[in-house]
Amino acid sequence: MSLEDLLAQEVTSAAKKPQKASDSAAAIYVITQEDIRRSSAHTIPDLLRMVPGIDVADINNSYVSVSARGFTSQFAANMLVMVDGASTFSSSLSGIFWDQALVPLQDIERIEVIRGPGGSLWGSNAVSGIINIITKQSVDTQGVRASIKAGNRQQSAELSFGHQAGDNLSYRIYGNVRRNDGLVDQSGNSLGSDWLGGLAGIRADFAPTPNDTVVTQAELTRGQLHEPEEVIRANLLNPGYDLVVRDNRFATQLGLLRWSHKASDDFDLYFTHSLRTDFGARVERSMGDVSIEAHIRAIPTHDLNIGVSGRIAHDLLTGSPVLSFSQKSNTDRWVTAYIQDDISLVPDRLRLTVGTKVEDNNFTGFEIQPNARLFLRANPRLAAWASISRAVRTPLLLQRNDNYQYGVLMPGEPGNPAPLPLYQVLAGNPQSKAENVLAYELGVRGQISTHWAFDFSAFYNRYDHLMTADLTSITPIFIPNIPFPVGLSGNFTTANNMKGHGKGFEILLKGDVTNWWEAEASWSYLDATETAYPSRAIAVAALIPFDATPAHQLRLRSRFKLSNSFSMNADVHYVGAVAHGVIPAHTDLALRAEYRVTSGMDISLIGNNLLKKATAEVTYFPQNYVPRTVALQLRSRF
Amino acid sequence: MNRRHLILAIGLALLGAGEARAEAGADLSAALIYNIIRFVEFPDTSSTLRLCVRQGDQLANALRQLNGRPAGRLQVRVVTTEGMEGLHGSCDVVVIGGTPAYSFGRPAAGQMLIGDTENFVESGGTVGLIRFGRQTRFAINATAVQRSKLRVSSQVMQLAAKVIR
């Protein structure tokens, strides 16, 4: 076991208790501290690009989609994202605002990523996977640590100070600030966007007894950004779009209290207050969450894990011409409970895990998410697992309570056979149901030789009640003093009128090519389609179509240790075409050259997206492209 | 079983549990020490890495299990001594458990001094094990590393809870 493994290897996301990644009955990948240090990533979503099977797509200046096994969209809300086990899930406009995930990279101990459902332990919206960002305990970050990056389009600084105030008390004060010039057009020219944000926080760890730890944390996040957006022209006699640069901002306050007894009994309490402006609208949210979890081992062969939780979220909503809300305030409530039993069928060889989560909320009602997982340790070098699980995705507030001026199709454009402009208006539906998935998974992982290991997982997912935009009516639009219609209003309503299935695999091979070259290669494949149920609607469209996700992704990550002071990392990443080829396949190259000046200081040259001036990753209006970037980084610890 | 026997049995069980916990803690400390020295380059040109510990040290039993294991290009040889004096000789790694670093004195060139007393690295030790709750971490004295002409990998330096210079 490596030093980092010894200090922090125990993975918590797969089983809600300490467990080695190699013993998890799930498709798990752990981004380690060393991975983070060697990475050329500037943000957490960029870090996630290294994970097999994860699709990361920059949509615009503020929205990033991070998905697994389908559902690439800022509105997908299929991946449950947590920081230290506390959900950052926002059920209002988007599942998560990734540009607000400003945890300093130097403070991250590891990121656990699970592909596949995790609803039976973690609840709704862990349909496609779980991302658990685990930060370092303050005792591990004593002294001053700083990181400064200066690049052609982005700059950032991270600073933290940690101190151990006694045998059982330590704390860390931390913060960062980031800015960037946003995404670009096809030629690599700026789109007029920029982004500036930062975070400041304090965390204290207290260990009153050898079996108890108490963590308290307070954090503030602020940001402002300029976002180019195509807005439907208000003058209906001159139909089309105006390009508007929105002046958006966000702010979050977080307070957290966690008491852990032994390794796995927890009491968590946290509160967040957040403000976000988007599409000209404003959402102010207050959310409180409390949970308690315990392990019971009354019988040696059974490890029982139980927990209950409650959450309340209150939103104050202010609309805009583009995005308006039928209710100006909304309160959602969730009560959940889970039970899971790890049954040792053959000690240290064969384990069966069965359990379920039950949830009751005020908008989709009662939800149940059971799973059964079998894990076989054939020998110390080979393990296999299989699972069957059900998970649900509950609709966002946006999909229950909004009126969204989606777009306008000019006469003759695909989708509009009429001689008038067709204005698409999407109305939320308070009766929206939860989507659900029944997932079958299996995996094999093991050591091929002393220096090489592999990890394979395959899945078949069957989806029901996928969210759709149903065209329910087309009505003429009249304006005063004009005797004929100037356009048509295509009235869409959010519904659950599709089913679908997805199948695919992820395979990873990692090891040492030579004593100075570490390599990791992976290939992920997805084949997913959706079909409409019989419906009275004029047309039914998938709200989150599967074709936004690439079928194939290939990655080759290399680290070259050239001397004690000098190392290089090279990451090549192929991403297949999406949106029926509208976004072509592309290959990215990221490089990092690092020179260790002293034992406490290093300097690096970082390049991202080096093969092209600008790369589109997903369709958007206006179309945004990810630029080529170069940066110099200085890191120091003293 | 009468009440007195029951109390005695519970007492012995608790005592045993305490010993078991201490053993588990020693095993973790030994594993940490092994994983640290694996990433250290010692100027010693021989093929053996001599790891010295006093016979009565609380980590001695756990460290003996490292005997014969590889550490980079070297092979670990655990040497146990009667007292502190025997630790000075030709040891590459000296583990002095609960003894303050100043009792040993400044480690020689090519030598790493490891202990787990409070402020171990501040008082001249090279690597100090830190207890926090039920966890064990480590601190590094970068000046002592440099003075002893050792080379510690950047990964170990990054994973240290504390680095003093």
Image: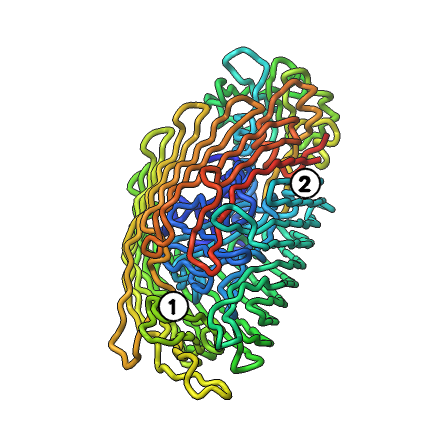
Of the residues tagged 1 and 2, which is closer to the observer?
Answer: 1
- Residue furthest to the top: B45
Residue located beneath label 2 in the image: A146
Q: Quadrant of residue A370?
A: bottom left
Q: Position of residue A257 (x, y in %)?
A: 63, 61
List x then y, in percent, for residue A202. Answer: 69, 54
Compared with B92, A446 (above or below) is below
- Circle 1 is placed at which residue position? A543
* Chain ID of residue with mark 2: A
Where is residue A143, by image quadrant?
A: top right
Q: CA distance from mark 1 to mark 2?
A: 43 Å
B13 up-or-down from A467: above or below: above
Circle 1 chain: A
Q: Nearer the viewer, residue B158 or A628?
A: A628
Q: Amino acid at mark 2?
A: Ala
Q: Could you tell me which residue is drawn at 67 percent across and 35 percent down?
A: A636
Compared with A98, B16 (above or below) is above
Q: Quadrant of the C terminus of chain A?
A: top right
Mark 1 nearby-residue class (10 Å; few <14, some 14–19, many ≥20): many
Q: Which mark is residue A228?
A: none
Residue drawn at (60%, 17%), measured in percent from left and top?
A: B91
Q: Position of residue A583 (x, y in %)?
A: 38, 52
Q: Amino acid at mark 1?
A: Leu
Looking at the picture, does residue A407 appear above or below residue B62?
below
Horizontal arrangement in the rendering, residue A156 relative to residue A446 (left or right)? right
